[in-house]
Image (cartoon, rainbow, N blue to C red):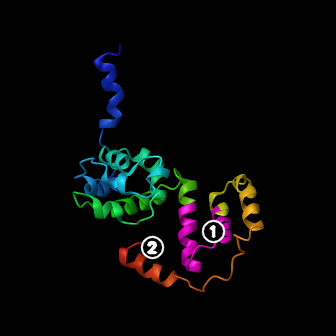
Amino acid sequence: MPSAETEREKTAPLLRIARSKALETVREMVAGCMQCGTCTASCPNAWAMDLTPRQLWRLVNFGQEEEVLASGTLFMCSTCYTCTLRCPRNLPLTSAMAALKRLAFEHAHKTRRRAAFYRSFVDNIRSYGRVKETALMSMYFLASRDPKLPLAFTAPALRLLGKGKLHWPGRPGRGSLGRLMDAVMNREGRP
């Protein structure tokens, strides 16, 4: 039977509040979270997340920056605003998730593969105005810097090409959202 001292030592990392200034803004956004689970119940992507939104907000409030940034939940958020609209405390959960994504980019060395995919996705939308799968995956493979990664996608890619579901990328520029995205970035004060 574990002693009370042993139990306290096990839970001490969960109870510590990190001194991270980067996480402080997000913590303030979700400080009023009462852990009701409405965000998780409302999220259309919760089934695919390694941490549910409710669990993520709990980790944020506990200051567990490493666990938060290592989570794939950040990159599964589709920014549909359902959680924000249904939150009984009217917390800006979608804005908090966006802030966590930006924080993950700043710490990209810890979450390189996920950040590489997200950055490739955003750059793909900026260039083409829509998702061009072959260009997206090419950019992702280059950004991830893992020579074995494309091999994992070879079989599904060949099946999709055989069924005519994948198309070679066209010219960037047509339908480009680059100027619009640059204006938003400037407004938010990001480079």
User: Residue 32, labelled with which disc?
Assistant: none
Q: Residues in magenta?
A: 117-140
For the point 71% across and 52% down, the residue is 152
Res 39 quadrant in image: bottom left
Q: What separation in Å lies between label 2 and label 1 (alpha carbons)?
A: 22 Å
Please state which amino acid type lies under the numbered disc 1: Leu
Quadrant holding the N terminus: top left
Could you tell me which secondary element the residue under label 1 belongs to?
helix
User: Residue 191, labelled with which disc?
Assistant: 2
Question: Can residue 120 be found in the magenta stretch?
Answer: yes
User: Residue 136, labelled with which disc?
Assistant: 1
Please state which amino acid type lies under the numbered disc 2: Pro
Q: Using the image, determine if residue 184 lies above or below residue 39.
A: below
The residue nearer to you, when weighing 70 against 84, is 84
For the point 27% across and 47% down, the residue is 35
| In-image side of 121 versus 1 (left or right) | right
Contact, mark 2 vs mark 1 (Cβ under 8 Å): no
Quadrant holding the C terminus: bottom left
Q: Which residue is farthest top? A: 1
Mark 2 or 1, closer to the camera: 1
For the point 72% across and 64% down, the residue is 160
| In-image side of 136 versus 33 (left or right) | right
Measured from the top left, where is residue 12 in percent x and y? 32, 31
The mark nearer the N terminus, 2 or 1, is 1
Callout 2: 10 Å neighbours few (<14), some, many (20+)? Answer: few
